[in-house]
Structure formats: structure tokens, C-alpha cells
Amino acid sequence: MKPVQRLSGPQQFFRREVTRHRARTPRWLLVLLLLLPAQAQATLLPGERVSGERPAPPAPEATLSLPPPLLVVGSTPVWTTGTVTPGQAVNTVLPTEDAFHELYAGRADLVLGTLPPPPPPAGTSSPLSVPVGVFAISVAYSLPGVDLRLDIATLCALLSGRVSAWNAPAVAVLNPGVALPALPVLLSARTARNGTSLAVAGACVKDGIWPPDQYKSNWSGGAAFRRATLGAQRTDLNIPGALALFPLQATPPGVQVARLRSGGGSYVAPRSELGLSGPRLPGARPLLPAAFRPLHASSEVGAYPLRGLVWASVMAEQAYRERGPERAQALLALISAMRSSSGRGVGRLPLNTWTTPALHYGG
């Protein structure tokens, strides 16, 4: 028999009060009161932890991340998104002068276009330009029912105004049996600097048809219409007798396009690919090694003779505007990706024309 434990006065008072309140308090409220200390214990200050609890794993260390997408600006963003790694570059169409202004100001990574760079502002180094593709130039015209054939000499004469009618003897001799209309040649020329005009002027000067001072990118020749944009030139083709030049990738669908005489005498439609298009007899050896079979010079047999270059221009010194060396490496990878693939209307360059861009980073 256990001895009776006598309670002190305060103990007796506490037991009576607990018994009295237990009778009055609902069971759900008692449960809530019992949970409150646990909830308060679960709310810890930063750095505190419950006794016996495993420490939280340390935060992972920051790792080197890829640079944000490169900003490519210019008039020729022709490479599709599948050509380069998704997220590698963002294209923004800008006129040539504006594009190089962004490059010189350090806000753009690369200018993609068909013209050489303008002089940089004072105190800014010159950019480095490398060719990344070749594009054909379409000779578009409006002569319903006429499948037109031209050579470079006659085309240059039409552009300069020396030949001013479509039924002139110089045109008729290239199109035997074709009823050429007695319409004036209405040339639509671009007044803004552009690579198409530069490439055509180079061909005409090279063949001795135009004087050397006409080798420029904004000649107007014997133009009936002087336009600032390709869109305006497209509208001019609604006029019978109109003549205009377009890069292949910007040629309006459905317009008439002349075939030009190539080396060997055949007349070929515009194509950017540098592949040898001459006939190959069964069992004959390839004309070029495998790596060069799709490539040729414009003077080769079957080659389309009127083409221009697409240039990628970057700043040789890449340490500017808090750029990291990883961004310069990404830029080199982008140039390599463009050179090794074809864009929309743009063909690849021969491998033996590739040059390694000499970029610098802080010396």
C-alpha cells in the first residue's frame, strides 16, 4: 500500500483549477492548445535547427553559364534557326549603316550583310570581316510570254542605258525565234547602298563594259525608277518592260527571271550553290574531290555567272562592355556554323576560302 502523498496548498489549488477548466473546455480546444508549443517550436530563426535534425545541404556553387544569345544585326539574316544551335543567336534586320553603328557602339555582336563596313568613328578600331556565304543575283523583268536569255555584256549594256529597247539587236541575237516587244527598258535601280548593286558593278567593270569609277554599291545607270527599297522595286515589275535586280533570297515569287549565259555557252537560272553543273558521263571520275563537288568558280562550265558574297563583320578586340571570353568563343562557333551550312538562298563557300578570324581578348 502506497503512502498517501499530501499536496501543498498551491498544488491543491492548481489541481482543482485544471479539473474545473477541463470540464468546461471542449475537447477540440484542448487538442489545439496541446499543438501550439509544437508549432512554435517549428518556427525557427534563420540558422537555427531542431536538435537532432540533419543540417541542410550546402547551396551549390555557381557554375560558368553559357553567354546569352548573340545579337546579329544587318540586312541579310538568311540563316534559318535550324542552322545554328537554338538560342545561339538572335537576328535583327537593320540597314547597313545602322547595323555597323550598333557594332561600333558595342551593342551588337556581329553584322551580317553584303557590303564592306563603313569607316569606324574616331577612336574605334576597324572590324574584321570574313565571307560566310555566296548568293546569286536574279535579273527580274516584265515581258509577258518571253523566256529571256542574256549574257553579262548585254545585261551591263541594259543597265547602263546603252541598250534601251527590248527588241534591240544585242538582245535579239541571244533570243533567236523570240518575238521581243518594242518596249523601252525601264530599269528600277536602288539608291541605297546594297551588295547586289556592288556585285553587278564588279562584274560589269571586270569585263571592261563599265569604267572603273562605276564600281560602287549605289549606281543608278540608265534607271527609269530610282527606289530606296526592294519593296518599291517589286511594285515596278507590274509595269511591262521593267527590269530589276534582286538577291536570290529576296526575289519575289512568280516574277519572270532571265537565264544568264555561263561558261561553256549554256544558259542557267540563278542559283547560289557553287556546284559544278556540267554534264557527267556514267562512270566518269568526279570533276572535283568529294569535299569540293558542290563548289566551283563562276567561270566554270555551267556556273551561274552573277553572284555576291555575304560577310560576317565583328570587332577584332572582344574585350568590351563587360564581355567574357566565352562570348567570343560562341561568336567563332556561330561563324563556323554559318560557313558550313546553307542559308535561305545562300550557298556555302569553298573550304579553301575559309580563313580563321583572328579575334583578341584583352591582348
Image (spheres, rainbow, N blue to C red):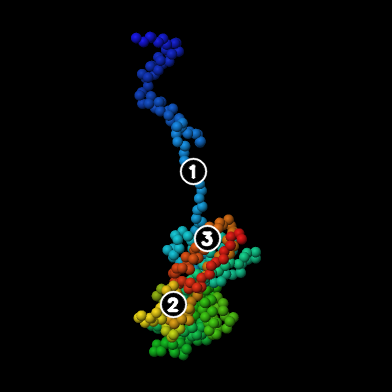
Circle 3/circle 1 CB separation < 8 Å: no
| Disc 2 packing (10 Å; few <14; some 14–19; many ≥20) | few
Residue drawn 43% across and 81% down? 302
Q: Residue 315, how many percent across, how many down? A: 57, 64
| Cα separation between marks 3 and 2 | 33 Å
| Disc 3 packing (10 Å; few <14; some 14–19; many ≥20) | few
| Cα separation between marks 2 and 1 | 58 Å
Q: Residue 11, how many percent across, how many down? A: 43, 13
The amino acid at mark 3 is: Gln
Task: Kindly identify which residue carries mark 3.
Answer: 329
Judged from the image, the secondary structure of the residue bearing numbered disc 3 is helix
Task: Kindly identify which residue carries mark 2.
Answer: 288
The disc at residue 103 is none
Residue drawn 50% across and 50% down? 63
Residue drawn 46% across and 90% down? 169
The disc at residue 59 is 1
User: In this orientation, which residue lies closer to the viewer: 251 or 349?
Assistant: 349
Residue 196 vertical position relative to residue 102 in the rendered view, above or below = below
Residue drawn 38% across and 81% down? 284
Q: Residue 71, how many percent across, how many down? A: 51, 61
| Disc 1 packing (10 Å; few <14; some 14–19; many ≥20) | few
